[in-house]
Image (tube, coloured by chain):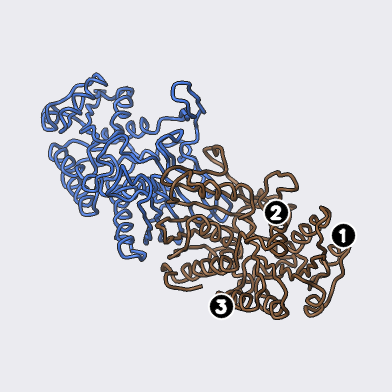
Amino acid sequence: MSKLRIGIFSFAHLHAEGYIGALRSLPDVDFIGFADDDRARGEHFANVFDARLFPSYEAMLDEGADGVVICSENSRHLPLIELAAKAKVGILSEKPLATTLADAERAVMVCDKAGVLLKVAFPMRFNAPAMEMHHLISSGGLGTIYAVNGTNQGECPHYHRAWFVDPALAGGGAIADHTVHVTDMLRWMLKCEPVEVYAEANHILYQDVAPKVETGGIVSLKFADGTIATIDCSWSKPPYYPTWGGLTMEIIGAGGLATLNGFGQNLNVYRHSNQRAGWSAWGSDANRAMLADFAAALRGDESRGASGIDGMRAVAVVEAAYQSIRIGQPVAVA
Amino acid sequence: MTLKIGLIGSGFMGAKHAAGWMRLVQLGYPVEIAGCLSLEPSTAVPLSETYGFPLVDSLDTLIGMSDVIDICSPTHLHHEQALKAADAGKQIVCEKPLARTVADAAEMVRVCEAKGVKLLVGHVVRFFPEYAAAKGIVERGDIGDPAVIRLTRCSFKPQSDRPDSWFHNPAYSGGMILDLMIHDFDYARWIGGEVTRVFARNIASRTQGGDYALVTLRHASGAISHIEGGWAYPKPMFRTGLEIAGSAGLIEHPVGRANPINVYLHQQADTSAPAIAVPGSPLLPEDDPYMVEIQHFYEVLVHDVSPRVTARDGLAAVRIALAAVESAASGHPVDLEGVGA
């Protein structure tokens, strides 16, 4: 079996840093390198990771690739998806798939027409505790699900990349950044679509470093089967929090209660060097499992990763949330 | 001169208040429970025997023998009892929720102000040390301006084969959102300031008498509160939590990390647990929130200390809770702006 040639498009998203190691660790994958429209950033990471930097996205495609992982700024996913689709190269796009529903629909359509694989990076589908919760719900262990109190809070990501707080590139602030993971998990676990969204947002946290976007938000969902849910997507963790943030769910079903802490497998670590508590994660690597699934999908094997349509459905919720904030009323999901 | 307390109700809260007043007696405060009016002899008789106060059979009698009427009756009865006590010029302690409707609560506030009697509302969460400590941290400015406030209060459904079954009649109790979540509506307002908009969804229509609601509050300050409340857990679970994210810091409670997965099933519930849940953390007797609350009431009543919870706070909490009930029913946010107390 020949190795799959997989590269990375852009280092705009910090997840690219983690993906390199994961791709290199997969036995059936040949990580061929990356391209970046930001020359300085590209050279920096080529040096850090001792990876090959292609002079352009086209150059990588011309040389031949089986798949690309797109880690550009959110609003720049679509042009890179179109480029890869044209070259008939399979795609794993960072989340959110796009900054507008129209762009997300176009991404799905373009890949569909080209007959190219489009997956979206929702690694929570490969998070071991979340998978156990998915199994519990799917097997009826909690009975009918009534309600989910979800959170995906974090520090303000501008510490990693400035574009996260630029509405033109990110599509918004905390809501664009942190609504989609829990939304996708709910669709995955409930096997049901959200039909109505209400949202409140504010701009009190991180005002100085994120002057143009909302930094606090609560998104309220209603699903077709009547399940209610909220997602706290706030950047409400301070930059000196023991870790970047977290993802939690409290799930109320007819059978009882289940709680999920998606990032609860940590060691408490105290270092003289930084004089504060830190959490060091020791759980399974969901990103690596997601990339292995992408490789399997490229080979035509069964895949359980999120599809382009899954990515698009999550974008529809984000768009409805922003619409709800504008009009102050619940909004039907397009 | 001894402060004479006339207690109404001998249920769960009546017993808590009786214990609080009796602790003051033990500590040598000039206070006594003059008598108790209760419709429920199964709880009233043992309580009167434990503490040695008489049971009376009319509100007029109780008012006649008391300086303070302490109302621990079912919610829908607060209004009439408070108005009668105020009319007689008696000071009033009233369990939360202040009343079953906004109109009732507003009238209670108005009449008590007109009559010059104090109306102290039992929003005991403000006396829980962890909640009081968090408030203190916010007040000191340690975490900057509150931005996102998350409050949780979930237990099992209070048992219905007890005299407390009025809980389960929304006409009397207002249901879980008014009876239980009002604690956190009051606390959210204490932290985040006046509430201007309320959005709620709940699951009452899908459960047998239980409920669980997720409520978003918008504050005039711009802060957002997320309030989770429920009578949906397996017995004997009761969990409370608070998280206050501010422009300059974060408060989290409880401290510590949850397991990756926890599952609590109704079929594994401990049915022998008490009928009603109260959250608790081991504390010395002098720090028991109900004791601290009663002691504070005494200081307000006798020494005119300014109350930690005003009657208008009690009214505002009812207003928020009933807006949540309305929002859950209509599916739309409810605006509280421009509504005067």
Task: Specify the label residue B292 is tagged with.
Answer: 2
**Are the residues flagged by discs 1 and 3 in contact, CB closer than 8 Å?**
no
Name the residue: 53% across, 50% down: A140
Residue hosting label 3 = B103
Indicate the amino acid at tag 1. Answer: Thr
Question: Would you say the residues marked 3 and 2 are in contact, meaning their CB atoms lie under 8 Å apart?
Answer: no
- Who's brown, chain-wise? B
Q: Distance between the Cα atoms at labels 3 and 2?
A: 30 Å
Circle 1 residue = B50
Q: Secondary structure at mark 3?
A: helix
The answer for how far apart the CA atoms under marks 2 and 1 are is: 21 Å
Q: Residues within 10 Å of mark 3 (few under 14, many from 20)?
A: some
Q: Tell me the subunit letter for badge 1.
A: B
Q: Image check: B58 left or right of B322? A: right
- Horizontal relation, residue A221 to residue A299: left or right: right
Choose between B172 and B225: the one closer to the eye: B225
Indicate the colour of chain A: blue
Please tell me whether residue A202 is drawn above or below residue A72 in the rendered image.
below
Packing grade of label 1 (10 A; few <14, some 14-19, many >=20) is few
Q: Can see residue A139?
A: no
* Towards the viewer: B273 or B327: B327
Name the residue rendered at 68%, 68% in the picture.
Answer: B94
Image location of residue A291, percent across then percent down: 32, 32
Q: Earlier in the sequence, mark 2 or mark 1?
A: 1
Which quadrant, please, contains the N terminus of chain A?
top left
